[in-house]
């Protein structure tokens, strides 16, 4: 067992039963011209976490943890995109429409791909998901059970949308989750801070939170 100095209290985990889940580090959310920008966001607010995310992925591979990259993207016919999701926001260029990074939030398009620094490596798992939570309409739960994974180290974007939704879904399914606080970011810094606080409040009602240095310290 390794133990992370975490909030609200120490987080014990066994790397052999732990997955790093890197949520949606895609060009569509981090680069100009993608879905995040179409929603009116300043995408540069997310870019600062990329080096820490790369370190977390490298650490996971070194210690034999399962690495999962999720990707919010729809099939090319948008058959898995609820009309409500496509209509939301009344965007001039929305989900499925042609944009500077290809069709917005569609699999196989440049925007759906991961940022260059965080490309999946051999042995990593890539999980496409149509929703904000990584458990909705995916095989993630079965995949984790099959590998004996009980603990999740979670990073990616955005903290209050896909990251928080996934962490709550995982918590309800019995996974012990640690939010790696400097490996996740929001377009709204105040939302990021609020999520960290609400996760660890009430005795860790959703799970634990700690910076990457604390995870590195636990594995040193
Ligand atoms: N808009 C926003 O903050 N996020 C998303 O739409 N998806 C993810 O968080 N991946």
Image: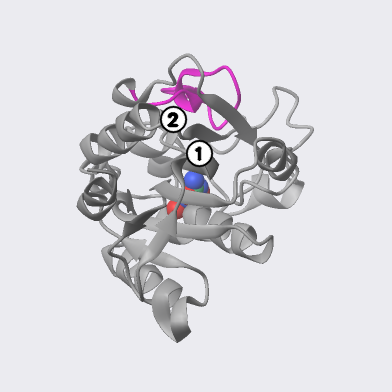
Residue 109 within the segment the image draws in magenta: yes
Q: Residue at x 33, y 72 (%)?
A: 7
Residue at (45%, 53%) from the top-left corner?
A: 13
Res 120 → quadrant? top left
In the rendered view, does 196 fall on the left or right side of 151?
left
- Where does the C terminus fall, quadrant-wise? top left
Residue where numbered disc 2 is placed: 64
Question: What is the crowding at mark 1: few (fewer than 14 residues within 10 Å), some, or many (at least 20)?
Answer: some
- The x and y percentages for residue 68 are 52, 34
| Region of the chain picked out in magenta, as a range | 98-115
Q: Is residue 162 above or below residue 47?
A: below
Give whichever of 103, 174 is nearer the camera. 174
The image quarter containing residue 165 is bottom right
Q: Are marks 2 and 1 in contact (CB under 8 Å)?
A: yes
Dot 2: what SS?
Answer: loop
Viewer-proximal residue, 3 or 177? 3
Decide if residue 186 is on the left or right side of residue 95. left
Q: Disc 2 or 1, which lies upstream in sequence?
A: 1
Residue at point 21% right, 50% down?
Answer: 217
Residue 11, percent from left and from top = 39, 63
Residue where numbered disc 1 is placed: 16
**Residue positioned 50% across, 38% down in the render:** 16
Let me know if residue 110 appears in the view: yes
The reply to whether the magenta stretch includes residue 87 is no
Q: Nearer the viewer, residue 13 or 119?
A: 13
Q: Of residues 178 and 16, which is closer to you in this image?
A: 16
């Amino acid at each position: 067992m390794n133990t992370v100095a975490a909030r609200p209290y120490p987080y014990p985990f066994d790397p052999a039963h732990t997955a790093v889940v890197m949520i949606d580090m895609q060009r569509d959310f981090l680069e100009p011209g993608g879905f995040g920008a179409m929603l009116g966001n300043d995408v540069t607010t997310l870019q600062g976490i990329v080096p820490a995310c790369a370190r977390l992925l490298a650490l996971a591979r070194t210690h034999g943890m399962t690495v999962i990259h999720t990707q919010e993207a729809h099939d090319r016919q948008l058959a898995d995109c609820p009309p409500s999701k496509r209509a939301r926001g009344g965007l001039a260029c929305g989900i499925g429409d042609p944009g500077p990074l290809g069709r917005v939030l569609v699999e196989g398009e440049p925007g759906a791909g991961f940022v260059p620094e965080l490309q999946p490596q051999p042995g990593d798992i890539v999980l496409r998901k149509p929703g904000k939570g990584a458990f909705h309409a995916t095989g993630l739960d079965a995949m984790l059970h099959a590998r004996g994974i009980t603990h999740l180290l979670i990073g990616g974007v955005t903290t209050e949308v896909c990251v928080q939704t996934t962490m709550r879904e995982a918590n309800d399914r019995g996974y012990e989750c640690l939010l790696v606080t400097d490996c996740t970011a929001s377009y709204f810094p105040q939302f990021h801070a609020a999520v960290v606080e609400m996760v660890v409040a009430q005795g860790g009602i959703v799970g634990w939170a700690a910076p990457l240095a604390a995870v590195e310290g636990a594995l040193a």
